[in-house]
Amino acid sequence: MDAVRTPDERFEGLPGWTFAPHYVTVDDGEGGSLRVHYVDEGPASAPPVLLMHGEPSWGYLYRTMIPPLVAAGHRVIVPDLVGFGRSDKPTQQGDYTYERHVEWMRQALFDHLDLRGITFFGQDWGGLVGLRLVAEHADRYARVAVGNTGMPTGEMPMSDAFLAWQTFARETETFPVGAIINGGSLSDLPPEVVAAYDAPFPDDTYLAGARVFPSLVPTSPDDPAAAANQAGWASLRQFDRPFLCAFSDGDQITKGGDAIFRREVPGAAGQAHTTIEGGGHFLQEDQGPALAAVLIGFIAANP
């Protein structure tokens, strides 16, 4: 598997990004290896808060959430999915599958970091990948929170907004990552923040993962990942540890997606589910400190 690695200098001087890089190496599934980047802040002895980003962002999305979580005494782990951020980027779209993303993160978070007692938050593909890990390794998790995400099985129709996004990602001549994230946020991002989201992608060689990701979402029952996600839901329907929904009020792609979690996951019963006001799809960008406060309260209320 051919892969490229974004030069370190691309990540120098990014506004609000002062966190030291950490790396593990995972098997790529074809006899080679890939380097996965993660942030690891706060006391090493504290139970981990695992924050997972989606498409086409990277760990930078959580820059305003890491400091308050650390100040509250938590260890915060923020990995970059393969193909994003400082993680290695296979150059062929065919190298990326849903199953591989789950396996790459499993190796990084469990085989290498051996995370346990996890409080998880995932948004967008951070939820699609992260919830599969919750479903398949439930004993490692103490609490789960989700926002603006899902775990589709292909049995329910996707929104028109999502289908339009799939078409755009597949067909557009240029794929302006920073502008896409700006467009998915209610706030107007400063140019230097837009540039920080572009930083991992010096040219189109680095964009195979970002371009193909929307097409990996199961949209029919015969999708290659549909059966595994159906099995994942069977597991989530038995998950009785605290489960919180914190979707935003301004995301047209995942609007209403919290209902199935609240209805189907036993651990969601009696929790203080909330709507993050003033948040677009990238609610961490619009309301990061408010979301961090929700997670801090969630942990405190469910010791």
Image (spheres, rainbow, N blue to C red):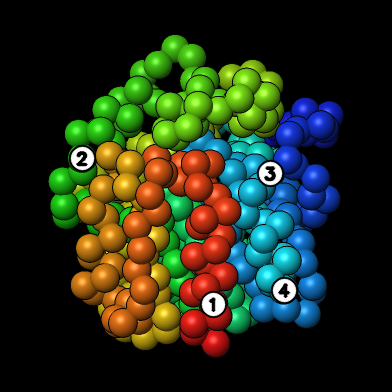
How far is disc 2 from disc 3 in space, using C-alphas? 30 Å
Q: What secondary structure is found at the residue carrying circle 2?
A: loop
Give the vertical position of 205 relative to 266 (above or below): above
At label 3, the amino acid type is Ser
Q: Is residue 198 left or right of residue 153?
A: right
Q: What secondary structure is found at the residue carrying circle 3?
A: loop
How far is disc 1 from disc 3 in space, using C-alphas? 29 Å
Say which residue label 4 marks: 73
At label 1, the amino acid type is Ile
- CB-based contact (under 8 Å), mark 1 and mark 4: no
Q: Mark 3, residues whose alpha carbon is within 10 Å: few (<14), some, or many (≥20)?
A: many
- CB-based contact (under 8 Å), mark 1 and mark 3: no
Q: What secondary structure is found at the residue carrying circle 1?
A: helix
- Please tell me which residue is depicted at 26% across the width and 70% down the height of the picture: 262
Say which residue label 1 marks: 299
- Please tell me which residue is depicted at 21% across the width and 72% down the height of the picture: 263
Q: Is residue 235 visible?
A: no
| Rendering quarter of residue 273 | bottom left
- Where is residue 79 shown, x and y percent of the image? 65, 54
- Where is residue 94 shown, x and y percent of the image? 47, 36
How far is disc 2 from disc 1 in space, using C-alphas? 32 Å
Foreground residue, 125 or 222? 125
Say which residue label 3 marks: 87
How far is disc 1 from disc 4 in space, using C-alphas? 11 Å
Give the vertical position of 12 relative to 33 (above or below): above
